[in-house]
């Protein structure tokens, strides 16, 4: 019985690992995760049977942390991926003016424009998004890809021309980075889609935002 129990425990661990791998690679499972994250973004007043809303804790904590950093004289580049971009935008609207003068915003894989503005126009509208940009003096860059099924541009095509400050927010990045096999690899560059990792486009955007913060005179 001892040997049988040890065998069953090992078999259970193996089955659990295989199930986790299958779930991770399953598009349907990832879709459930996206829907779950979307549902728990809104407070329970919108859907009382849902789990607790993480935004009610995340936004105040972010606001407090940014306040601490700026009070010490630091400049802050707030970075938000996917639903994190929605949290970042909500946080910007909660910051006092003396904090916002030392804050810039970088978003990527952001569903703010092509998802939230479309499905929740009473809460995320063009006016609300422009208010976020205005409060930051338009120190905001949004990286997006055509291959991203979740994120996209925030303002395109709703800009009012090249002089509109919103026209400088959205930056389309190439995906894949190229079609040829790099000299240091054996396969062509992969299609990243909604996956974002710190690359040259990311670091260039960070450097530009840091430079803009340095020109505020604070």
Image (cartoon, rainbow, N blue to C red):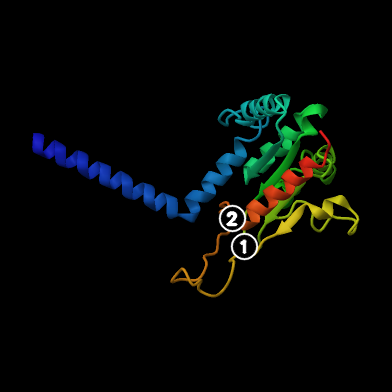
Up-down relation of residue 203 to residue 5 (above or below): below
| Residue wearing tag 1 | 147
Task: Tell whether label 1 touches label 2 (CB within 8 Å).
Answer: no
Q: Position of residue 9 (x, y in %)?
A: 21, 38
Residue 3 point in image, percent of width and height: 9, 38
Image quadrant holding the C terminus, namely: top right
Q: Is residue 111 visible?
A: no
Judged by depth in the image, the label closer to the viewer, 2 or 1, is: 2
Decide: few, some or many residues near mark 2? Use Cα within 10 Å; few <14, some 14-19, many ≥20.
few
Task: Looking at the picture, tell me which residue is in the foreground, 47 or 167.
Answer: 167
> Which of the numbered marks, if any, corresponds to residue 24?
none
Q: Position of residue 208 (x, y in %)?
A: 73, 50
Q: Camera-side residue: 10 or 122?
A: 10
Q: What is the secondary structure assignment of the residue under circle 1?
A: loop
Query: Left or right: where does residue 187 sit relative to residue 203?
Result: left
Above or below, comparing residue 88 to residue 142 in the picture: above
Q: Which residue is mark 2?
A: 199
- The residue that appears at 68% across and 56% down in the rendered structure is 144
- Residue drawn where x is 64% and y is 26% of the image: 61
Q: Is residue 156 left or right of residue 40?
A: right
């Amino acid at each position: 019985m001892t040997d049988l129990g040890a065998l069953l425990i090992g078999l259970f661990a193996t089955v659990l690992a295989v199930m986790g791998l299958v779930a991770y690679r399953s598009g349907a499972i990832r879709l459930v995760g996206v829907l779950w994250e979307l549902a728990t973004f809104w407070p329970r007043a919108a859907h009382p049977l849902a789990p607790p809303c993480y935004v009610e804790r995340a936004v105040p904590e972010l606001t407090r942390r940014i306040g601490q950093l700026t009070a010490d004289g630091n400049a802050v580049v707030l970075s938000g991926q996917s639903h994190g971009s929605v949290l970042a935008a909500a946080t910007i609207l909660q910051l006092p003016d003396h904090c916002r003068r030392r804050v810039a915003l970088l978003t990527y894989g952001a569903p703010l424009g092509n998802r939230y503005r479309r499905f929740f126009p009473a809460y995320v509208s063009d006016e609300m998004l422009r208010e976020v940009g205005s409060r930051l003096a338009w120190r905001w860059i949004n990286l997006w890809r055509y291959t991203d099924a979740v994120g996209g541009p925030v303002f395109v095509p709703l800009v009012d021309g090249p002089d509109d400050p919103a026209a400088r927010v959205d930056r389309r990045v190439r995906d894949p980075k190229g079609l040829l096999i790099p000299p240091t690899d054996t396969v062509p560059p992969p299609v990243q889609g909604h996956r974002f990792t710190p690359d040259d486009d990311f670091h260039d955007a960070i450097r530009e935002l840091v430079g803009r913060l340095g020109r505020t005179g604070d």
